[in-house]
Amino acid sequence: MEVDRLDGRNPNQLRPLACSRNVLHRAHGSARWSQGDTIVLAAVYGPKAGTRKGENPEKASIEVIWKPKTGQMECEMILKRTLQSICLLSIHPNTTTSVIVQVVGDDGALLPCAINASCAALVDAGIPLKHLAVAISCALAENGSVILDPTLVEEQKMLAIAHLAFPNPPLSVIPKSSASDEVQPIEHGIITSVTHGAMSVRDYFNCLERGRAASAKVSEFLRRSFQLQVSEDSSKAI
């Protein structure tokens, strides 16, 4: 039995995606990511010399600042760990790269939206990456059905929600000249998994399977978005 969605989408249908890079001229890299009415602006500054207290000076450090701060400490910590796991921290040791996330609109699936925005901003800043993180939200309804990319109203009605981020080979998304030669393609795996509410192991793996399939759609959108940006930059240079 499927859930009737207020916006008419089917269970596997994502909201319209939009991504713009280089939107903040004073930042070293920036991106605006939207999924429906959920909108996040991410800005990257650095790498700057020195690491924060308690960080390993033999590696690069990632700092995440989430705005507005109120009630979002968990998201800030999860985003930092996600970005640390995808960045090549050995290339610029004893430096700090700051990622500032500004929530413009929250209509559900906020954490995946922030992950996608931050990854696009890191690419825009030229930060070396092992791979990209492609994030998606899955929600479990009372009747056991799973929907993708829930709105805020849908999230409030669900039994449980899983925010998932999957690794994506940069060569499948970023133009070859922008990708690191050290990176090896990744076909499987998961970078981040955050659940709220209670779900069975079977339901979780169902979310994982559905989320991984949906991440391919997000990856394809990223590829088209990045290629369009490269084409526009090339035309401006002529």
Image (tube, helix red, strand yellow):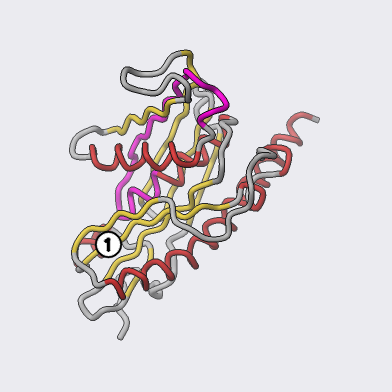
Q: Nearer the viewer, residue 106 or 88?
A: 88
- Vertical order, 121 against 2 (above or below): above
Q: Is residue 187 left or right of residue 78?
A: right
Q: Between residue 32 and residue 49, name the one nearer to us.
A: 49
Amino acid type at mark 1? Ile
Residue at point 62%, 47% (across, down): 170
Vertical side of 119 occupied by 107: above or below: below
Residue at the spot x=36%, y=52% of the render? 37
Label 1 sits on residue: 161
Q: Please tell me in which quadrant of the rendered image residue 72 appears.
A: top left
Quadrant for the N terminus in the image: bottom left
Residue, x 70% and y 35% (percent of image)? 233
Q: Which element carries disc 1, helix, strand or loop?
A: strand
Q: Is residue 170 left or right of residue 157?
A: right
Q: Residue 119 placed where, x, y %? A: 49, 41
Residue, far top: 49
Q: Which residues are magenta?
A: 89-114
Most extreme residue toward the bottom is 1
Q: Position of residue 142 (x, y in %)?
A: 20, 76
- Local crowd size for mark 1, using a 10 Å CA cut-off: few (<14), some (14–19), many (≥20): many
